[in-house]
Image: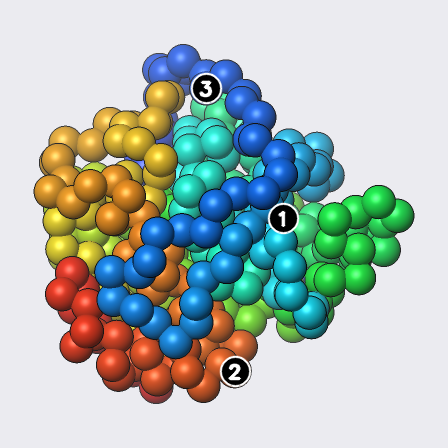
C-alpha cells in the first residue's frame, strides 16, 4: 500500500484549496449533441488533417460527461481523459476537446465534483483513471453506443488543465499524492500511455520536487499566464525525470488559453490578459497536445512534427524536447 505524501499543492490553485464557498457554482450546461464542424485549418499545418467530430452526453461513474469523437473512420480510437482545472465546469472545454478529438481521439470530459479539504467544487482525482477505463470497456460494448466497437479499450492518454494537470503529474508518477488522490493507494494502469498538461506546475512554496514520471509528459505553457507562471513550468519541466518529455511555450496565451472564454465562471481569475484570440490559443494548444499524444502512440508523422518541423513552422511556439 502506498501512503500518500503531503506534497505538490500547486500555487496556481492554492487559493482554491483554502477558500470555503468563495465562488458561485457553475450551472451545468449540456453540449450540443450531433455533428460538430471540423476545426479551422491549423495555423501551422501538421501531418494529420483534422476531421469532423460529434459529441454526446454520457456518465462516468457519477460524473456527467461530454464525449467528443470523430464522426467517421475505421480502426479503434484511443481515449483521452481531460482532467479539468479547479472550479472549471467541463462545458468550458468544448472547443479544445473537439479539436483534440479531430486528430483521432475519443475525448471524455467528466465533471468531477468532490470535497477538496474544505472546498466542495470541481476538483479532479487520480481515481478518475480507473473509472474511465471501466467506462471505456462498457461503452465499447453497449448496444446503441455511438462508439460501439470503436474504442481501443487498452489505450488511454491524459489531458489536464491547471489543478487537473497537477493531478495528471501525480498519475504519471504512479503515486497517491494529496490533494490529488482520494483513496489510500494508486497504481498506474498499463493502458495509460502519455499525458499533455496545460498551465501546470509542481511548485509548492518555491520548491520543485523531482518528478519520477513513468509515462511521457508534455507541458504546454502560455507565456502570458499570470496564474501558473512560465518560470514555474520551466522549473517543473527540468524536474521531469524521464523522457520523452516536452515543453511547448505558446506566445501570448494566458492561463485560460484552452477554455472557450476567459475567466470561466466560478474559477480563479486570471490577472494577465492574452494577446491571442481565444480561437487561436485553443487551436495551437490543442494541436500540439494532440500531435504529441499521437506521437507517443506511434504515429511517425506526428513524432517528426512535435520534435522537429513543428517548432520551425509555427511562429507562436517555442519548443524544448528531450528523448
Which of discs 2 and 1 lies nearer the camera? The answer is 2
Q: Could you tell me which residue is drawn at 46 percent across and 56 percent down?
A: 100
Instruction: Tell whether label 1 touches label 3 (CB within 8 Å).
Output: no
Report the side of 77 relative to 275 (left or right). Answer: right
Visible residue check, residue 210: no
Report the side of 169 relative to 277 (left or right). Answer: right
Query: Which residue position holds label 1?
Result: 127
Q: Measuring from the top left, give residue 194's x and y in whole percent.
A: 49, 69
Q: CA distance from mark 2 to mark 1?
A: 27 Å
Colouring scheme, one of rainbow, by chain, secondary structure, one colour: rainbow
Q: Measuring from the top left, give residue 22's x and y in whole percent.
A: 35, 15
Q: CA distance from mark 3 to mark 2?
A: 38 Å
Report the side of 275 relative to 103 (left or right). Answer: left
Name which of mark 2 and mark 1 comes first in the sequence.
Answer: 1
Number of the label disc, if any, that sits on residue 298: 2
Query: Which residue position holds label 3?
Result: 26
Numbered disc 2: secondary structure: loop
Numbered disc 3: secondary structure: loop
Quadrant containing the C terminus in the rendered view: bottom left
Crowding around mark 2 (Cα neighbors within 10 Å: few <14, some 14 to 19, many 20+) is few
Report the side of 175 relative to 128 (left or right). Answer: left
Name which of mark 3 and mark 1 comes first in the sequence.
Answer: 3
Which of discs 3 and 2 lies nearer the camera? The answer is 2
Q: Could you tell me which residue is drawn at 41 percent across and 47 percent down?
A: 96
Amino acid at each position: 500500500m502506498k501512503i500518500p505524501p503531503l506534497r505538490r499543492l500547486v500555487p496556481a490553485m492554492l487559493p482554491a484549496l483554502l477558500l470555503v464557498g468563495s465562488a458561485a457554482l457553475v450551472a451545468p450546461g449540456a453540449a450540443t449533441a450531433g455533428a460538430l464542424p471540423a476545426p479551422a485549418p491549423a495555423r501551422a499545418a501538421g501531418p494529420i488533417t483534422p476531421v469532423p467530430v460529434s459529441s454526446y452526453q454520457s456518465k462516468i461513474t457519477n460524473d456527467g460527461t461530454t464525449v467528443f469523437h470523430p464522426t467517421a473512420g475505421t480502426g479503434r480510437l484511443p481515449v483521452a481523459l481531460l482532467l479539468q482545472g479547479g472550479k472549471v465546469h467541463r462545458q468550458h472545454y468544448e472547443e479544445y476537446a473537439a479539436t483534440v478529438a479531430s486528430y483521432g481521439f475519443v475525448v471524455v470530459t467528466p465533471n468531477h465534483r468532490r470535497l477538496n479539504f474544505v472546498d466542495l467544487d470541481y476538483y479532479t482525482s487520480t481515481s478518475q483513471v480507473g473509472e474511465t477505463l471501466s467506462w471505456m470497456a462498457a461503452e465499447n460494448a453497449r448496444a446503441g453506443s455511438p462508439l460501439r466497437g470503436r474504442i481501443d479499450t487498452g489505450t488511454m492518454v491524459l489531458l489536464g488543465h491547471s489543478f487537473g494537470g497537477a493531478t495528471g503529474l501525480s498519475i504519471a508518477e504512479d503515486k497517491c499524492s494529496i490533494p490529488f488522490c482520494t483513496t489510500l493507494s494508486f497504481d498506474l494502469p498499463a493502458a495509460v500511455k502519455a499525458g499533455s498538461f496545460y498551465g501546470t506546475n509542481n511548485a509548492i512554496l518555491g520548491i520543485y520536487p523531482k518528478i519520477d514520471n513513468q509515462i511521457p509528459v508534455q507541458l504546454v505553457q502560455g507565456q502570458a499566464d499570470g496564474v501558473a507562471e512560465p518560470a514555474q513550468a520551466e522549473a517543473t519541466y527540468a524536474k521531469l525525470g524521464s523522457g520523452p518529455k516536452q515543453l511547448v511555450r505558446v506566445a501570448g496565451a494566458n492561463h485560460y488559453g484552452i477554455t472557450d472564454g476567459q475567466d470561466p465562471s466560478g474559477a480563479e481569475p486570471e490577472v494577465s490578459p492574452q494577446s491571442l484570440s481565444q480561437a487561436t490559443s485553443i487551436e495551437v494548444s490543442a494541436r500540439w497536445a494532440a500531435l504529441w499524444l499521437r506521437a507517443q502512440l506511434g504515429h511517425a508523422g506526428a513524432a517528426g512534427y512535435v520534435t522537429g518541423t513543428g517548432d520551425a513552422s509555427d511562429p507562436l511556439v517555442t519548443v524544448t524536447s528531450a528523448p
